[in-house]
Amino acid sequence: MNKPTVLVIGAGLAGLAAARKCQQEGLNVTVLEANSRTGGRIWTDYSMGVPMERGAIMFHGTQNNPVADIATNLNIKLSTVDTSSLDFGNDKKFSLTQLNASHDQFWELVHKAGVEARKTQEDKSLFEAMLPLLNEYPTLNEEMFAWRNYFLSLHSAAGAKLLSAQNWVKDELSLEGDYPFVIGGYDKIIHYLSRDLNIKLNTKITEIDYQQQIISVKTQNEVFNASYVIVTIPLGVLKRQEVQFKPALPKEKQNAINSLAMGILDRVILKFDTIFWPEQTHILGMLAKEYNSFAWFNNYHLYTKVPILVGAVAGALAQELEQLDDEAIVEKAMDSLKQLYGPHIPKPKAYIVNKWGQAPFTYGAYSYIPVGASGKDYDELAQSVADRLFFAGEATIKEYPGTVHGAYLSGVREAKKIIDLIRN
Ligand SMILES: Cc1cc2nc3c(=O)[nH]c(=O)nc-3n(C[C@H](O)[C@H](O)[C@H](O)COP(=O)(O)OP(=O)(O)OC[C@H]3O[C@@H](n4cnc5c(N)ncnc54)[C@H](O)[C@@H]3O)c2cc1C
């Protein structure tokens, strides 16, 4: 008897996990990937002589995290980031006690705003929900509140003004354990998961016709057929309707695609000849009442021994900065660093700029729940259609959206659904 055939669309973590699981169970699997590389939103860049991550960078909790387990087995170097090791430049000094207090108070405020918002009927933004409670938290003056919100936006790829107060729960859903940076190259995990798989690169799917028992999947000039298809293309791509489904996807699923939102998180990676910042500090931050540029830099010298800073920006500000060309974005980052360490700091000798909002095949960094949407939308996205079309990816897993382990687990989940169908 012929082995049942499965096509997996997308060779990111969800697609690779799904394909491996199906192949292990003896199914005939092909992965179709639009890009010229595997990994999707995991993308390691070696142009600076050390592995630097353009996409995912850390594990959101190492306990019961299957991807962190792979990293451990492969001996990939990880480094814990001390988020209380902060420097706000030459003229702003805080004690550790002050910093810890403002950190704790901010997250208490976020939590309380969510609790209060869930008591009301209508959803509002997390920001709106926080404002009336703000004066209960004395360490959060205007600047510190803005700074903590800046971090929140890095965490969720969208600022508090966009997030649903009632349903913004990512924080509460993280796994236990550390949040280490992957220093030794996230791509090693991708190579490990890709081994022995039949992956066709540069294969951009434009249509999935699932009217018949045998599904036909089309590119501009090729057609592939299979009994089962697992779609892992990102929410940003689904939103743009770059892939036509025949028949159209069920209304509930299309509504969920429209309701959830794709956030932006961008980094600028700057390599210098020398260090001009405090060598032992993990994070360099800029305090301001409002932000129009990078306000957060990770000191990568600590992990790589190379003078590298990684600036991060997210949400509406990232979207705005993406309109600039790469040189202008680097200038923006340098302006922030000059505010912190004076006008005479050296110029970077190399840089990497990311614009995830514009990245073809992704159109954003990861999903978030905007005002009016909820976790149910993730469940809806995960629903299979007609027992032959399956959906995986970070935006299909309510428990761990926007994460690598979420993507991985969603891929395994969908593979299991197919295996169960075949067995029964
Ligand atoms: C800047 C950034 C930072 C992040 N930081 C972290 C972090 O620190 N920790 C963490 O846990 N997560 C992080 N994430 C999120 C994490 O990277 C993602 O949740 C996860 O990698 C998504 O995997 P996926 O398989 O769902 O999607 P993807 O990795 O996007 O895979 C989908 C694949 O589908 C392909 N595709 C798209 N359209 C088509 C088409 N038409 N035909 C064929 N193929 C197509 C894409 O090219 C891609 O390879 C970050 C993401 C970004 C962008």
Image (tube, helix red, strand yellow):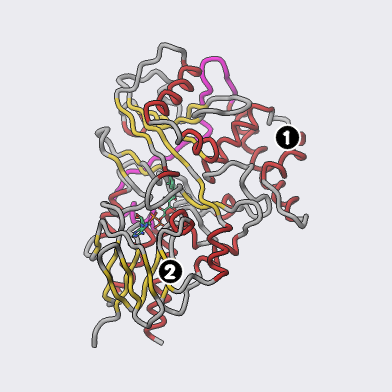
At 47% from the left and 33% from the top, the residue drawn is 321
Image coords of residue 320 (percent x, y) = 51, 35
Q: Would you identify the image quadrant in which residue 411 lies? A: bottom left
* Residue receiving disc 1: 137
- Between 2 and 356, the one nearer to me in the picture: 356
Q: Earlier in the sequence, mark 2 or mark 1?
A: 1
Q: Secondary structure at mark 1?
A: loop
Q: Quadrant of the N terminus?
A: bottom left
Q: Secondary structure at mark 2?
A: strand
The answer for how far apart the CA atoms under marks 2 and 1 are is 50 Å
Up-down: is 326 above or below 19? above
Task: Confirm or deny contact between disc 2 and disc 1 (CB under 8 A).
Answer: no
* Residue receiving disc 2: 245
At 47% from the left and 75% from the top, the residue drawn is 385
Q: Which span of residues is magenta-colored?
A: 67-95
Q: Residue furthest top?
A: 344
Report the magenta stretch's main SS: loop
**Is residue 64 shown to the viewer in this render?**
no
Q: Residues within 10 Å of mark 1 (few under 14, many from 20)?
A: some
Up-down: is 347 above or below 71? above
Q: Amino acid at mark 1?
A: Tyr
Image coords of residue 21 (percent x, y) = 33, 70
Q: Would you identify the image quadrant in which residue 412 lies? A: bottom left
In the image, residue 76 lies in the stretch drawn in magenta: yes
Q: Amino acid at mark 2?
A: Phe
Q: Quadrant of the C terminus?
A: bottom left
- Drawn side of residue 174 relative to residue 227, left or right: right
Image coords of residue 154 (percent x, y) = 52, 40
